């Protein structure tokens, strides 16, 4: 899996954890190992510009996903996964820090960025949370991926509560 993490935010983040959780999520979703993903970490001003440009919404947001080849997980276990460019995930540590602090369970900026990375991966794979049933599916899958990744790394505790709006 070719995953690039480019931190343009000026904030010190755990880039290795973002890389690892993205790789875990893509493997868990059975995405072809030769597929490519880019994760870009930006400051609040850059995120606000993207949020206005692409969503016509004011202020910075936590995560944005820009799919390329619209890859989807294979329908059946024995299907060969498609290969291609997944797209870009853009993260904002300033928003992640605030959301982590305000979460009911309270967690670190890096934990929130890990959650947002998985959230972004799922958006690239076609998942959404506009409707209640879609939200339940996506957030359930997101929690299962984070919990599995944390268990694999020997990190105790449940996944952070979703703070994605």
Image (cartoon, rainbow, N blue to C red):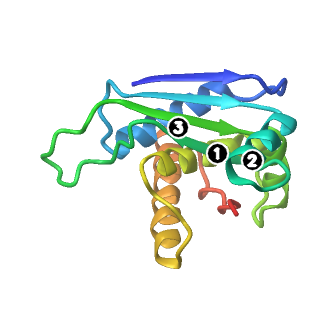
Q: Is residue 138 above or below residue 120?
A: below
Looking at the image, residue 5 sits to the left or right of residue 32; the answer is: right
Q: In which image quadrant can residue 65 be found?
A: top right
**Residue occupied by mark 2:** 51
At 17% from the left and 50% from the top, the residue drawn is 77
Cα distance in 3D space between marks 1 and 2: 8 Å
Q: Quadrant of residue 79?
A: top left
How packed mark 1 is, by other alpha carbons closer than 10 Å (few <14, some 14-19, many 20 or more), is: many
- Above or below, 137 relative to 60: below
Q: Earlier in the sequence, mark 3 or mark 1?
A: 3
Q: Indicate the position of residue 14 as horizontal and vertical percent values.
A: 69, 29
The residue shown at (76%, 31%) is: 42
Nearer-the-camera pick, 104 or 132: 132
Q: Is residue 28 above or below residue 4?
A: below
Q: Check disc 1 and report the residue beneath it.
A: 64
Q: Secondary structure at mark 1?
A: strand
- Asked if the residue under mark 2 is in contact with the one under mark 3, i.e. CB atoms within 8 Å, the reply is no
Residue 91 x %, y %: 69, 39
**Residue 7 locus on image (x, y percent):** 72, 23
Disc 2 on helix, strand or loop? helix
Q: Rounded to the nearest whole Å, what is the CA distance between mark 3 and mark 2?
A: 24 Å
The residue wearing badge 3 is 21
Q: Nearer the viewer, residue 52 or 26?
A: 52
| Alpha carbon separation for disc pair 3 and 1 | 17 Å
Are the residues at dot 1 and dot 2 in contact (C-beta closer than 8 Å)? yes
Tell me the quarter of the picture where residue 110 sits.
top right
């Amino acid at each position: 899996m070719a995953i690039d993490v480019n931190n343009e935010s000026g904030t010190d983040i755990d880039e290795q954890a973002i890389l690892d959780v993205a790789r875990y999520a893509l493997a868990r979703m059975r995405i072809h190992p030769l597929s490519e993903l880019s994760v870009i970490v930006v400051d609040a001003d850059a995120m606000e510009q993207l949020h206005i440009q692409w969503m016509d919404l004011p202020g910075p947001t936590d995560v944005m996903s820009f799919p390329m080849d619209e890859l989807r997980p294979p329908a059946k276990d024995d299907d060969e996964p498609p290969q291609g460019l997944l797209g870009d995930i853009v993260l904002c540590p300033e928003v992640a820090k605030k959301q982590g602090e305000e979460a009911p369970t309270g967690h670190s900026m890096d934990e929130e960025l890990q959650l947002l990375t998985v959230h972004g991966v799922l958006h690239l794979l076609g998942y959404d949370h506009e409707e209640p049933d879609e939200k339940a599916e996506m957030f359930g899958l997101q929690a299962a991926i984070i919990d599995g990744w944390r268990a694999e790394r020997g990190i105790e505790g449940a996944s952070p509560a979703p703070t994605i709006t």
